[in-house]
Each structure stands twice: as C-alpha cells, then as structure tokens.
Image (cartoon, helix red, strand yellow):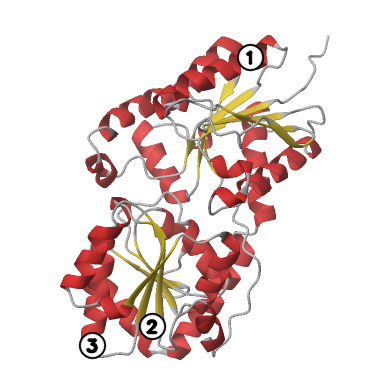
Amino acid sequence: MMQKKIGNILLIGKDPAIFGNNLGIGDALERHIGYARRWRASGFPDAEIKYICYTDRSEFFQRQSPIEGLELIPTRSFCRAAYAWDAWRQIAKLVAKGWTPDLISPQTPWEEGNVSAIASRKYGAKLVPQLHFDLFSQNWKDENWMNPIRFKLAERVLRQADGIRVVSNVLRQKAVDHFQSDSSLVLVSPVPVSVKSHVKISDSSKLKKKIGASDAPLILFVGRFCEQKNLPLWIRVAGNVVKQGVSVQFVMVGEGHLLEFLKKQIDELGLTTFFSFPGKKNTEDLIDYYAAADLFLLTSDYEGYGRVIVEANAVGTPVVSTKSTGPEDLIENGQTGFLTDCGDEQALTERVMYLLEDKKTRIQMGAAAKQKMIQEQSPERLHNGVIDTWRSVLLGGN
C-alpha cells in the first residue's frame, strides 16, 4: 500500500512578531503565510505548518490560524527558562490530537534545537535546524560565557540533522568545513525580506526633512545596539570622517543595552551634534530612513546574513561593511559596495570617505546594488528556496 504523503512541518522559534507586526520590525507573518501557500502548492496539498513560538503570558498571544494550513501556537511561558519545556508540551498536545510532524525545523540549534532533536527521534520526523548567524565565529563565542556551552549543544544537534538550513554561502562553507559533512546536506536558504520599492532620488532633501534630518550627507545604521555590531568601531569611524572636515550626519536607528554606553562614547569624542538616535522604527518608516541615507555603514564582527544590507540596497543605498560572513554573499566589493576586514578602522574610514566625496560613484554603486537585490533577493525566489529546502530533505533531493 502506498504511504500517504502529508508533509507536515513543525517550526519552533522565538519571533513573537509573527503574531502581529506591531510587535517589532519585520514581516514574519507575511513570510509564513507565503510558506504555507507555496508548500501546499508544491505537492503537499494536505500538509499543515505549525509554528510553536516563544511568548510571554500576555493575553495578546493566542493560538490562531491566519490561513488554512498555517497555525501559530504561543508557548505563553512564565519565563524564558520555561520555553523549552513549554515547547515540548505543545508538541505533545499536537501529537495527542492526532497531528504528527514529518519535518521539524528549529530556529536555533540549541534550546529549541534540543527539543526538536528529541521530538524528531520520538516521532520519526526529519530534523532541519536553522543557522541564521555565524555559529563558528570566535567573536560570538567570546561574547558571552554561555556561548561555548551553546556551541557544544548546537554541535550535537547539528550532527544529528538530516539537513541544515543556512542563510549564506559563506556560512554554508564554514558548516561543511567544521562538520566535514556532505555539502548537499547544508542548504542555503536566506530569509525573505519584503521591502516596498522606493525611488532613490538624487536630491533626497525631502526624505531627509521627513525623518527630521538636515540636508548634509547621511550615514545610517539600523539594528540592535549590541556587542555583535561592534558599534564603538562604527563611532570611531564616524569621528575619523568628521576630522576630515566634511559636512556629514550620522543616524543610528534601533535600540539595545549599549545605547547609553555609545552615547557616552560619542560625547567624549565631541560628536554629539553630528548624531541622532530616533529609536526603533517599524518597517514602513524604515524605508524612508534607508532611502534618505547616502550610505549605510556596518561594522559587525559577525553576521549570518545581513538583512539590513538587503533593505538598504533594495532602495539603492550602497553599503560599506566588514567581511563578517553574510555580507560577503551580498556585496560585490567595489561594484555594489565595499567590504573590509573586520576591525579595520582605517579601511572603513577610507571607503566611507571615498563614497562621500564621489557622488557619481555612490549613485552608480547604489543602482548596481539595487539591481543585484532585484535579481538575487526577490521575496518570491527566497520563499521558494525555503520550500525547496524542505522538499529536498523530505523527498531525498528530488
């Protein structure tokens, strides 16, 4: 008797924005609706995607089904420490009601990764952990005393996996080299990014006025104020640019525990009048910031992907970035932007100054970057990449 093909997918993660974009920057719900539609259309018409997501006990977080074939299940955990146990309880409830997964994909390879590994063995499901950041970065390991422990937990889970989903080719190669694994088991599938088209105009004074900035050339950062981004280096580069006597302004969009530390550094360098911190912005407002910027500067020590590069390039804003894994996939050095070695303050300063002083090249690079994003990073193409990853593991590469 031919076995019935179902193709149920269980996702486990920590992105509460999936319950509504008002919770933060991103398009998680839109992405997963796209996954559900494409997955059923790809040959699994009876399949369901269940997403178990870490949340607190707020009444806002309730079980819901945005469309047929997709169900969002909050853990409503008392605290973060209870997340793994609560995720396991939700899996057990699903199985008790007759629903079993054919493939389980945890967002990180520890915590929910360990829960997923246990569940995959117990219920005979394929295991496909995700790597959205550079697990192999020594900077990451040194950042927190828990990270070496997380690394060991992740290693154990990844060695059990039927496939590993990574978000960049450079990260894929690192995973293949580290595990000495069959390269066909490490599948590249970036996170789809939805950015509405925004015309990049040579005279961006209107957009700058809209976001409360002056007409001076604007260098932008968007992201979390955390150790990974090496923002003290970002500020030192800004200081070097100011010393060149050029008219310039710096806008840092986001939030994080290093905010006050960074403001203190800026004050000590005498740069306060050049900086503004508008806080965290929603997706719609961010488009104006990206389009108003003359260039985007990223000084991270490690990046799995580099979503902000895609967002900046999508509106024609060129990026100067460190070679921190993900950006190496996204930027063609000297063509769509610039890449420097991590921590190279002099090289970063030189590349920023070059683009500030050469408006023609800056505009050309921005246009080339936008075209590259259109060709390589369209949401449709990347949605299909996720679907192809699941199909490859479930159907053995067919």
- Local crowd size for mark 2, using a 10 Å CA cut-off: few (<14), some (14–19), many (≥20): many
- Above or below residue 346? Residue 17 is above
Secondary structure of residue under mark 3: loop
Secondary structure of residue under mark 2: helix
**Residue 110 lies in quadrant:** top left
Q: Of the residues shown, which amino acid type is indicated by label 1?
A: Lys
Q: CA distance from mark 2 to mark 1?
A: 56 Å
- Above or below residue 261? Residue 177 is above
- Above or below residue 160? Residue 137 is below
Q: Residue at x 50, y 76 (%)?
A: 211
Q: Quadrant of the N terminus?
A: top right
Report if residue 53 is visible in the image.
Answer: yes
Q: Of the residues shown, which amino acid type is indicated by label 3?
A: Gln
Across the whole image, how many numbered discs are drawn on residues? 3
Q: Quadrant of the C terminus?
A: top right
- Local crowd size for mark 3, using a 10 Å CA cut-off: few (<14), some (14–19), many (≥20): few
Which residue corresponds to mark 2?
A: 355
Relative side of 143 to 29, left or right: left
Which residue corresponds to mark 3?
A: 244
Which residue corresponds to mark 1?
A: 93
Residue 159: image location, x then y, percent:
42, 24
Q: Residue at x 20, y 66 (%)?
A: 265
Query: Which of 43/363 is in front?
Result: 363
Q: Of the residues shown, which amino acid type is indicated by label 2?
A: Leu
- Local crowd size for mark 1, using a 10 Å CA cut-off: few (<14), some (14–19), many (≥20): few
Tell which tag, 2 or 1, sits nearer the viewer: 1
Residue 298 badge: none
Relative side of 248 to 48, left or right: left
**Residue 122 lies in quadrant:** top right
Relative side of 296 to 66, left or right: left
